[in-house]
Image: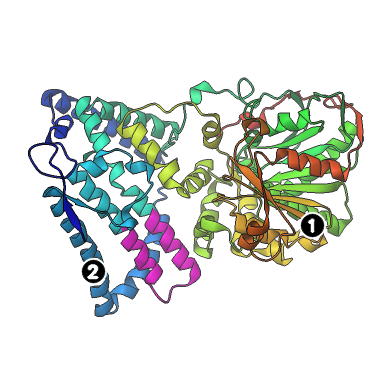
Amino acid sequence: MTAEKAEDTTGKGGFAGFDPKSVEPYIVKDPESLAINMARAVEQMGKAASAWLAPRETGEKAHTFAQPVSDMVKTLSKVSEYWLSDPRRTLEAQTNLMGSFFDIWSRTVHRMAGDIVEEPEILKRNDKRFADEDWVKNPFFDFIRQAYFVTSDWAERMVEGAEGLDEHTRHKAVFYVRQIASALSPTNFITTNPQLYRETVASSGANLVKGMQMLAEDIAAGRGDLRLRQTDTSKFAIGENIAITPGKVIAQSDVCQVIQYEASTETVLKRPLLICPPWINKFYVLDLNPEKSFIKWAVDQGHTVFVISWVNPDERHANKDWEAYAREGIGFALDTVERATGEREVNAIGYCVGGTLLAATLALHAAEGDDRIRSATLFTTQVDFTYAGDLKVFVDEDQIRHVEANMSSTGYLEGSKMATAFNMLRASELIWPYFVNNYLKGQDPLPFDLLYWNSDSTRMPAANHSFYLRNCYLENKLSTGEMVLAGKKISLGDVKIPIYNLATKEDHIAPAKSVFLGSSRFGGKVTFVLSGSGHIAGVVNPPAKSKYQFWTGGPAKGDLDAWSEKAKETPGSWWPHWHSWVERLDKRRVPARKAGGPLNSLEDAPGSFVRVRA
């Protein structure tokens, strides 16, 4: 370690770059008001606790913490066993951690003496949580920041260095360690976050009163579960300022409504376009507003667009499995398209799990000789789950049995469970910043349409969800030709139609590596395209925004990194590239169609199914 004597800019010596006057914002000016507000905050915490306990005392809600906590303890215990089973390894682990703390202490002492000390590269991070300048300038917070980074890195190394762990256990251990590290970040606590500390002192604790009131409201809104507000939901109304592309609901089954959108061009492509969205979320992510709407853009290019709007299921749908969703969803929609337009051949799009269902349905159709879908586009869709990412943490035999047992009592999985799982994949961005801003700063979140959609969760039918977890994530049967639908073993190799397979570079739900591998499972020509950004922003990327980029290249064979090195990068949205691909398949046009055609309209788009909240 090298150190140079810093120029004393304060005239009093001390921590390099630290002005003793800067501690004034941390000094309580009105202890009486602070004491009163702390008492009021505790009162609101009591209301929050009551809102959480009440449905559990009446039996409306069951205590569900035991199983996930038990799994976490069991997983991390296997890591601990390795390091504690040998005294030499135990000493090595302790020495590594303590040595890092001594290094921090040594740097701090030198800086307190006015020396300029270069921080190690490993601690130089572009972490938005530590953007406040006092994380570096203030010796107390600087020490805490460094200690947090060192400890969380050490914990991950303990997992990586533990021998004898199977791949799934190691994956879970890394995930749990990162969740714990995110939860215990000093940015999440008043006394260890300089900005929170200053705001609490400046408002005499009024921020905590407002925050605890919001916490009580959010638990009450979740009927005993915390419904973390990520946006101001009062600013949005489905069908009024979100999901407003003109159209009609023209058919309805037990599991879906089928929407046809009004044409905006004089002529339209002869082949209609059917979109199969995920049922884990609602379809209007593709129709957030006129500027972002893929649906409106596709209509404006001359597509006759049909969309499946899935039911938000309840106990009546407990036995609706994948075959039901394939028959009463995709099959029913294809029948509706033909009755509405007279066209038998269609182009289809599937998004996420909707794409997985579409791929499985295509394989079933191939086995049955049903050739109505003439091309398929898959948005961030996995058909091979070998590299399925962190969601695999939640999938093993014990955890699936636990989920199935919970679903057996209601017939469905609560929407909040899936929402929490997705948020946990990016806890440092999707959970803890909102926890801090809402409940510790007492700030109302800003309106954001995408986060409104994200909070509008859906339930999962028991049979459907169990089939998906077991056949896809646990046993990966779709990729191996072992999945059984309608009593038939289905194979993606039988799918010979053209496929446009879109992955996004930063996807944490359907990793690009996983989507790339899935391309090789189809029997026909696959056009693989890699978009910039993630699972949502990489898909919902209108050309007018001129954001991100996409890569195109040869067949999706071998390794994704090798493919990417040779791929052509194009700035902006991939939407026009996709439209050109569709037109090359069949560019015939016909006069614009009226929504519904000979069918009677049931209601205006976006319909009633999408308005049902979990």
Q: Amino acid at mark 2?
A: Gln
Which residue does the image show at 78% across and 34% down from the upper left?
306
Q: Are marks 2 and 1 in contact (CB under 8 Å)?
A: no
Mark 2 surroundings within 10 Å by alpha-carbon count, few (fewer than 14), some (14 through 19), many (20 or more): few
Disc on res. 363:
1
Q: Which is nearer the N-term, disc 2 or disc 1?
A: 2
Q: Quadrant of residue 176?
A: bottom left
Does the rendering let one see residue 532?
Answer: yes
The segment highlighted magenta reads 152-178
Q: Amino acid at mark 1?
A: Ala
**Nearer the observer, 421 or 296:** 296
Q: Is residue 534 left or right of residue 147?
A: right
Question: Circle 2 sits in a helix, a strand or a loop, which is it?
Answer: helix
Residue 198, given in percent of the width and then of the height, sits at 22, 32
Position of the N terminus by quadrant: bottom left
**Residue 214 inside the magenta-drawn segment:** no
Question: Circle 1 sits in a helix, a strand or a loop, which is it?
Answer: helix
Disc on res. 336:
none
**Residue 162 inside the magenta-drawn segment:** yes
Disc on res. 94:
2
